[in-house]
Image: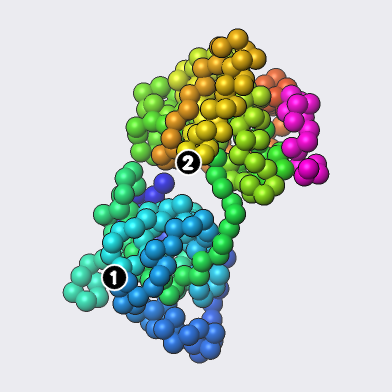
Amino acid sequence: MLRWIDVIKFTAQGNPPPDRVVEKTEAEWEEILTPEQFRVTRQAGTERPFSSEMCELFEPGKYRCVCCDAELFDSGEKFDSGTGWPSFSQPFKENAVAYRRDKSLGMDRVEALCSTCQAHLGHVFLDGPAPGGLRFCINAVSLQKMESSERKATFGGGCFWCTEALFQDLRGVIKVESGYSGGSVVNPTYREVCSGRTGHAEVVQITYDPQAIRYEDLVRVHMGTHNPATLNQQGGDKGTQYRSILFFRSEEEGSVARKVIAEVNQLLDNRVVTELAPFETFYPAEKEHHAYYNRNQGKPYCEAVIEPKLAKLRQGFAALLKGSVLS
């Protein structure tokens, strides 16, 4: 999660390199953009406040640069700031947006630009919602909204190396990311979480297509591939960071999770200790924790702990694996 200190660092010391670069002449940009799009994105203009209905759109989707089609923001980070411009609390990823000091109009601000093509998007301010506190104040004309059916689910059930390896094999799962949730510290480190003092659990955040796999299926896989009857422990991993927990993003998800937990509880003679909590914030883990199993197959931990879980997944949930036919 980006914070103001990160934005200032990027502004002063240089921005993270983009995934790709798009360069055109001013004449080429002018040819493919409308006059208003060109004025705002290529000449650092500002649209009139409340001039776009995009301020009131909060349906699931992704927002891309109108110039180069680079993905910039997700609707999950969009909020109503009341300012008259679309507002986001975080970019799609760290290197999606670039930052530059702007001293025009007698003010000292931080300009937000598309990292891919350097289009002017707007500005970023330190008056956004917790925990990051950022408000990306973006001109609607610089964005194009792309409808998306993607959803996210966040579960904890022991070491996230194991959990990540399990969910990445499921049909309809687009991305699985290891991280931390459920605690009180902003941007915790792995060492801090392992101390047990932050209150966070090791979790995975799953991006999935609900047309290919249901949320209920994801919950059932989670409950069926770890031990939901051991308090703050999975095998040899002990501590509150290893607790069994399901985070829900809506009442509908909460109801589904409660139903599955109740069914599993009956099978385990009322011993389930899985927590159910509303989702608040997900903090990605450090890079060395991502795709751990994929990068370390053959290591003792993977062979002794992760591979037996994968075997259990393949045996119990074969119909949900990638390559299976959707019924």
* Mark 1 Cα-neighbour bin, 10 Å: few <14, some 14–19, many ≥20: some
Give percent across and percent down for residue 94: 46, 54
Q: Would residue 319 be counted in the magenta stretch? A: yes
**Residue bearing mark 1:** 102
Against 260, is 188 above or below? below
Question: Hey, which quadrant is residue 157 in on the image?
Answer: top right
Q: Would residue 265 be counted in the magenta stretch? A: no
Residue nearest the observer in this picture, 255 or 35:
255
Question: Hey, which quadrant is residue 227 in on the image?
Answer: top right
The type of residue carrying mark 2 is Ser
Secondary element type, mark 1 = strand
The type of residue carrying mark 1 is Asp
Against 207, is 122 above or below? below
Against 228, is 105 above or below? below
Left or right: residue 224 compared with residue 95: right
The colour scheme of the drawn protein is rainbow
Give percent across and percent down for residue 279: 44, 37
- The reply to whether dot 1 and dot 2 touch (C-beta < 8 Å) is no
**Residue bearing mark 2:** 250
Residue nearest the observer in this picture, 154 or 105:
154
> Which residue is pictured at 56% across the width and 48% down the height?
151
> Which residue is pictured at 56% across the width and 12% down the height?
270
Q: On residue 254, which mark appears?
A: none
Residue nearest the observer in this picture, 63 or 303:
63
Residue nearest the observer in this picture, 43 or 32:
32
Q: Which residues are magenta?
A: 311-327
Left or right: residue 67 compared with residue 320: left
